[in-house]
Image (spheres, rainbow, N blue to C red):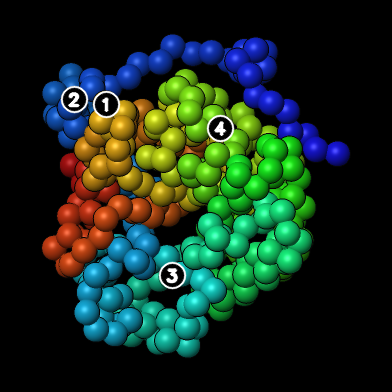
Amino acid sequence: MSKWTPWTRRNFLSHAVVTPITLPLLGTTYFEQAASADETTQDVSLRGRIYKTLKLGMVKIDGTLEDKFNAVKQAGFAGIEMDTPRMDVEATRKAISATGLLVDGTVISTHWSIRHSAKAAEKRKVALAHLRESIRKTHAVGGHTTLLVVGHGKDGSPEEVWDRSLENIAQAVPLAAELGVVIAIENVWNHFLYDHQGDSNQTVEPFVRYLDQMDSPWVGMQFDIGNHWKYGTTGDWIRRLGRRIVKLDAKGFSRQRDTFTKIGEGDVDWLDVCRALKEINFYGWCAAEVDGGDATRLREISSNLDRVFRLQSA
């Protein structure tokens, strides 16, 4: 039987601890806020805790896969996330060997169109096959996570989407455990586990309950810092998710302009994000997920990650 229940304000207040929220100044970038802050921010540095990676599709470099890997490494990244199921394992292994760039994980490129929450059983069967293939290929190139969007709210009632997706994904967990690859669920704008038309004071509790119902250390969250700044207080979501966060995605977002931005632009409270990540004792990978480009643009993205997470030496 499903453990999904409609998440109303009354439900939230009966389950959550409400804490005061301080929002950054709208209309200023994070870098401007940090420069004008009175407090010393060295204590929120995540140097030695965050390892930088990015999505393969962001690398707009002509040439071979090895050329792309070299450009990513020279830009200051330690890893890259590949696309599955189409990833060529042998070509990827050769690029890793030639450049020393790690493949820390993968992204299942078909998860938006072939969903674990689909009404048709045949569609769910294909989604499961893609997930299993992604786990195998991720393991084959030394990665430890495969990113997954679990479904979409348009596939049925919240309870139906909850039940179908959990049941389908659970069938891949034994393989994930056998090969040591974590199924990393991303918080995205998929009309599920949050109110798409709602305000910025939403709770993360539905995500917590969804992950906990899976009840496996091989299923966690690849928490996207920018995706749900529109809907909730990012630092507080991180604190509540805690150990469930296995990896991060990073992008900027402006509530004032209602749009995604470069990392460090917009009004995401990055200082509180850093504090929260330290409080939950997070160590791991953070994948940039913004508009990519050539070598110059990749260096800019790498530098922006350094700045928001305080990764450079003082």
Residue under pointer 3: 82
Q: Which residue has dot 4 on it?
A: 194
Q: Distance between the residues labelled 1 and 4?
A: 20 Å
Which numbered mark, 4 or 2, is in the foreground of this view?
4
Q: Which residue is tagged 2?
A: 27
Which amino acid type corresponds to the residue marked 3 in the rendered image?
Met
State whether residue 146 is above or below residue 13: below
Q: Which residue is nearer to you in this view: 16 or 114?
A: 114
Q: Are marks 1 and 2 in contact (CB under 8 Å)?
A: yes
Residue type pointed to by label 4 = Tyr
Report the disc number at residue 256: 1
Q: Which of marks 3 and 1 is nearer the N terminus?
A: 3
Q: Position of residue 256 (x, y in %)?
A: 26, 26
First in residue order: circle 4 vs circle 2: 2
Q: What residue is at 47 percent from the left and 88 percent from the top?
A: 90
Query: Is 285 or 111 nearer to us in this picture?
Result: 111
